[in-house]
Image (cartoon, rainbow, N blue to C red):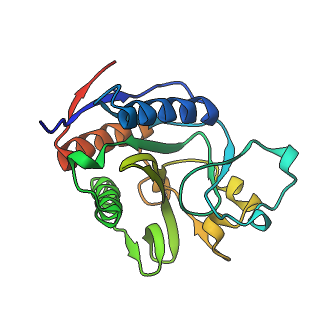
């Protein structure tokens, strides 16, 4: 029987990346081993840190490694930054219950983000040859996923009202000249708690989830 039940966590406190990464890995391993059949969604914010995907170039970090929290992790994509004011969404899903196709999954994530931003009257789109979601030549959302035995990990981030100057310490997503923007640049009254509600609602609709608390 296909299981569309997902545990959801939505902490109000700012979380450390390392703690949430360990949490994701635990749920991923439980799905792979058959110990659990529960998907897992996490919605929240991180303390300032930088993460590098598989194959990232260290030269895209423009600061000494001991200056900031930096994590090399098992996702695709290049270097990015997480911080308060940016909403991060992680999805640990068993694609055996959905569609064993990573291209389908990435397009699904893009659709979710575009629909979320559209709910706040922000017109955005994908960009040929690049991941993430863009407003013209400016990037507002980054996507980076991992997958093992068709169980996903990591997800996407949306800049709501974060300190964009933190991106100046990297070459964002390995793209020279990439300019990052916030939702608040286009909708001054945007509130991250409201964005979180909309993200949860659209994920639930797109994946036909039954959300439960652990």
Tell me if I can see residue 108 in this picture: yes
Q: Which of these two is toward me, 44 or 152? A: 152
Q: Which of these two is toward me, 101 or 58? A: 101
Left or right: 109 in relation to 164: left
Tell me where residue 151 sits by quadrant.
top left
Please determine whether, in this image, residue 59 is positioned above or below residue 10. below
Please determine whether, in this image, residue 50 is positioned above or below residue 42. below
Tell me if I can see residue 122 in this picture: no
Residue at figure coordinates x 68%, y 77% from the top left:
176
* Furthest residue toward left: 1
Residue 49 position in % (x across, y down)? 68, 44
Residue 148 position in % (x across, y down)? 44, 49
Residue at figure coordinates x 40%, y 47% from the top left:
152
Tell me where residue 124 sits by quadrant.
bottom left
Left or right: 136 in relation to 35: right
Residue at figure coordinates x 27%, y 57% from the top left:
100
* Furthest residue toward top: 214
* Furthest residue toward bottom: 128
Number of marks in the rendered image: 0
Residue 112 position in % (x across, y down)? 30, 55
Residue at figure coordinates x 44%, y 52% from the top left:
147
Assign the C terminus to one quadrant of the image.
top left
Residue 196 position in % (x across, y down)? 37, 39
Q: Which of these two is toward me, 194 or 104? A: 104
Q: Which of these two is toward me, 91 or 102? A: 102
Assign the N terminus to one quadrant of the image.
top left
Please determine whether, in this image, residue 146 is positioned above or below residue 38. below
């Amino acid at each position: 029987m296909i299981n569309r039940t997902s545990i959801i966590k939505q902490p109000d406190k700012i979380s450390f990346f390392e703690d949430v990464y360990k949490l994701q890995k635990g749920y991923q391993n439980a799905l792979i081993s058959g110990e659990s059949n529960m998907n897992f969604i996490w919605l929240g914010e991180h303390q300032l840190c930088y993460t590098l995907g598989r194959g990232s170039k260290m030269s895209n970090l423009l600061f000494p490694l001991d200056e900031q929290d930096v994590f090399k992790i098992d996702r695709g994509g290049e270097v990015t930054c997480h911080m308060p004011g940016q909403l991060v969404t992680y999805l640990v899903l068993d694609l055996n219950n959905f569609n064993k196709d990573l291209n389908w999954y990435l397009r699904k994530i893009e659709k979710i983000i575009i629909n979320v931003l559209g709910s706040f009257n922000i017109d955005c789109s994908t960009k040929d040859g690049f991941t993430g979601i863009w407003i013209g030549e400016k990037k507002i959302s980054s996507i980076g996923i991992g997958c093992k035995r068709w169980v996903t990990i990591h997800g996407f981030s949306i800049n709501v009202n974060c300190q964009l100057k933190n991106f100046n310490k990297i070459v964002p997503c390995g793209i020279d000249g990439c300019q990052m923007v916030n939702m608040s640049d286009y909708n001054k009254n945007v509130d991250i708690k409201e964005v979180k509600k909309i993200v949860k609602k659209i994920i639930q609709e797109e994946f036909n989830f039954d959300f439960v608390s652990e």
